[in-house]
Amino acid sequence: MAFESLTDKLQNVFKNLRSKGRLTEADVKTALREVKLALLEADVNFKVVKQFVKAVEERAVGADVMNGLNPGQMVIKIVNEEMVSLMGSETTEIRMQPGKSITTIMMCGLQGAGKTTTTAKIAGKLKQKGKKPLLVACDVYRPAAIKQLQVNGEKQQVDVFSMGDNQNPVDIAKASVEHAKKNGHNVVILDTAGRLHIDEDMMTELTNIKEQVDVHQTLLVVDAMTGQDAVTVASDFNDRIGIDGVVLSKMDGDTRGGAALSVKAVTGKPILFVGMGEKLSDLEQFYPDRMANRILGMGDVLSLIEKAQETISIDEDKEKEMAARMKKGKFDFNDYLESMKQMRNMGGLGSILSMLPGMGKQMGNLESMIDEKQLARTEAIILSMTPEERKDPKLLNLSRKGRIAKGAGVDMAVVNRFVKQFEQSQKMMKQMPGLMGGKRGRGGFGGMRFPF
């Protein structure tokens, strides 16, 4: 997971700061040297690191901080604030044209950055906000690029405009705007061609599109896993064609995260979204403050709540009924299956835990404890039960358990252990009803429930 190594290193630095009753100037400088090394190892631009450390030191080495009641905590607070400032301070959204005017967005980026998938993800986000987007296939060079966009558009239930691969991309872009006017679309998203590296042909084509079509937003998709190369690409695109914002893809991968901390400072352009997986729903609005909290191991509960609310679709009456059963410890195996489905839709248990405060340093241990095969076996056990058995766990006598074990392909001991754990979960939920509420404000995380 992105930032995991950086988070661990920074938490070690902060742990040492907190352990000191009083801080000397030497303590602060020693801590900041460790912070500097951690950021450089995370592939943050060295000039950005230098400016960041200098800004923190100027604020931290002062009488107000050094002589305060909790100087270590104050330094951490300053690091957090400067990190938020580094990434842009405020959340930036795609600027839409007023009224019924069509907003044209041009997506660009190198081949392999995930541009076409990201284009469809953004269309889905805009559709959720009540817009009627039109995806436009302007990549006439890459084999299957048009088909990929059409498939993703169908999944997102968004219209796709294509003129095949024998037309000039500029003509396609111009025709798509006319098509949008006639068919009631208020957002046009141009999926342009990428290259393996920046070249004159690509830049000329993008420039021509911007000259012939009234492009309101130019968004660049960069691969976060390429670290400093992503920042260099962003700078080159901005210098050559001008960009309005950046989307970081593959932030869920084994990346050191340096691009997220460097892009805004180097290019002056904000990060709008981060891609956190391959699913078309795995695109998050970029919040500098929340990202800083994640990096510093402080969690991101707000994003977790929003992710739950976006992912979990449940009937209001059914929600109240399930919540009431859980509070009484009466939930059954059907509820359990529903919870597993919700967890999977949100990226799995590891993804959820990574957003909780203080979990960063423990994620390595937790991930080794989370056995996906075990979860699959659990699901197989429940699916081997009859509908009556799922509704009433008390029906599970010895012979029924034997039949279930055979159906799931596991030993009887595995079934016995699972049923026992399930009964313990029932008792725990009954004792902690506050965890079981529905929407935010009634307890829980926007309706998600994980009784295991």
Image (tube, grey):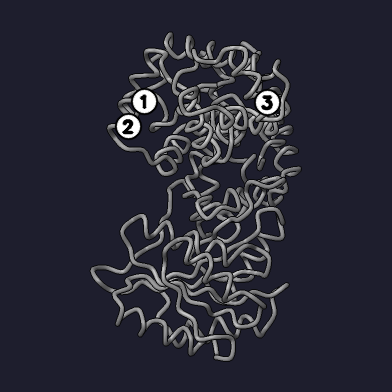
User: Please, is residue 347 above or below residue 329 in the view?
Assistant: below
How far separated are the C-alphas under marks 2 and 3?
32 Å
| 71 on left or right of 402 | left
What residue sits right under mark 3 in the picture? Answer: 366
Disc number lying in front (2 or 3)? 2
Quick check: marks 2 and 1 in contact, CB under 8 Å? yes
| Rendered residue at 71%/45% (across/down) | 256
Disc number lying in front (1 or 3)? 1
How far separated are the C-alphas under marks 2 and 1?
6 Å
Residue count near mark 2 (Cα–Cα under 10 Å), binned few <14, some 14–19, many ≥20 = few
First-in-chain label (2 vs 3): 2
Looking at this view, is 102 or 139 the one in front? Answer: 139
Residue count near mark 1 (Cα–Cα under 10 Å), binned few <14, some 14–19, many ≥20 = many
Residue 302 percent across, percent down from the top left: 44, 35
| Rendered residue at 61%/64% (across/down) | 234
Q: Is residue 78 visible?
A: no
User: Please, is residue 37 above or below residue 415 in the view?
Assistant: below
Q: Secondary structure at mark 3?
A: helix
Residue 340 percent across, percent down from the top left: 53, 32
| 8 on left or right of 153 | right
User: Please, is residue 70 above or below residue 225 in the view?
Assistant: above
| Rendered residue at 39%/31% (across/down) | 447
| Rendered residue at 38%/68% (across/down) | 133
Looking at this view, is 198 or 114 the one in front? Answer: 114
Q: Amino acid at mark 3?
A: Leu
What residue sits right under mark 1 in the picture? Answer: 322
User: Please, is residue 252 above or below residue 21 in the view?
Assistant: below
User: Which label is found at residue 318?
Assistant: 2
Residue 435 percent across, percent down from the top left: 42, 19
Q: Amino acid at mark 2?
A: Lys
Residue 403 percent across, percent down from the top left: 64, 23
Q: Amino acid at mark 1?
A: Met
